[in-house]
Amino acid sequence: MEIIHTVAALKMLLAPLQKADSKIALVPTMGALHKGHLSLIEMAQKQAQIVVCSIFVNPTQFTDPKDLERYPRPLEHDIKMLYDAGCNVVFMPSVKEMYPSFPTPEHWQVDLGPAEFLLEGEFRKGHYQGVTQIVKKLFDAVQPDVAFFGQKDFQQVLMIKNMVKYFNMEVEIVSCPIIREEDGLAMSSRNIHLSLTDRENALVLSKALTYVATHFDQENLPTLLAKAKTMINETPGVVLDYFTIADGETLLPIENKNAAHPVALVAAKVGETRLIDNVLLS
Ligand code: PAF
């Protein structure tokens, strides 16, 4: 496994492989890897000859400096996990490598469509501009044929697909299923911050989503939403940001169940940690 720190070195390594028509997959991450990330690597290995995993805690997508500061960075552990998983290349650039003028911001504004400003976009203003800015830089550096992202960040996958359309890029975006702990908690690098009590309380998010998924055909939308929100609001230590049943492409709340791609999405603060989760309803 090669560990690379600069775009120039990465391009030099990948150029002959690209010339030889090897299929290259990229798995972009911010590190603090868990089984969810490993599932992305495994999916990538099934579809490509070379798998590049990037580890970069991207400052431009954090709206809260404290969140950036406390983001976990267990680099040795991450590298071992990637080595054991048979990843081919790890790209671990510095902030200066990706943003040479940092901390002076680079100009970046992409039209990601109206869904940018809903849900996470409402609570984390500018977040998806930051995400798409770094993902575009990573795509430019790696020139992957295919890139893998977790469905847990449902809106992120949609925004990245919109960015790819905006720039007419050729990379295929694959959304991979959410990996859950045995008790239903969606795996996330942020779970490390949950106390034992938070961890217990956080289960209400997947329980509320499961309730909606299993009763979607029987109960009407207002009842489903009311029940899910009540479950969450009645759980101590959990502060709900949103729970919605939305169209998977516009992210607007659906008005009837015939919507093409209904999805239930939730975000809440559990103790000091903000968690998101979702479930597809079709
Ligand atoms: O999902 C993440 O870990 C990040 O948002 C991503 C896609 C690696 C961009 O920094």
Image: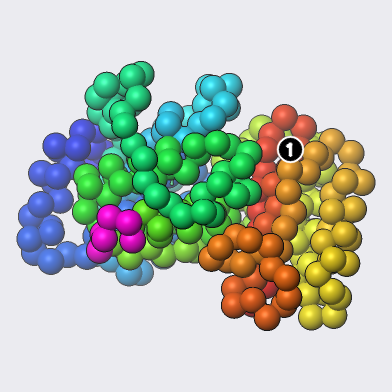
For image coordinates 63% across by 49% down, the residue present is 119
169 relative to 187 in the view: left or right = left
Residue bearing the label numbered 1: 269
Q: Which span of residues is magenta-colored?
A: 165-170
Residue 133 image offset from top left, x and y in percent: 35, 41
Q: Nearer the viewer, residue 257 or 236?
A: 257
Residue 38 location (% of width, % of height): 47, 54
Query: Tag 1: Cα neighbours inside 10 Å, few (<14), some, or many (≥20)?
Result: some
Q: Residue 167 at what x, y percent from top left?
A: 28, 55
203 or 45: nearer the viewer: 203
Magenta region, mostly helix, strand or loop? loop
* Residue 162 in sight: yes
Question: Label 1 sits on what residue type?
Answer: Lys
Name the residue at 55% across, 36% down.
125
The one of 191 and 240 positioned closer to us in this rendering:
240
Q: In the rendered view, does 275 fall on the left or right side of 203?
A: left
For the image, the number of numbered tags is 1
In the image, residue 266 lies at what x, y percent? 70, 52
Res. 245 image quadrant: bottom right
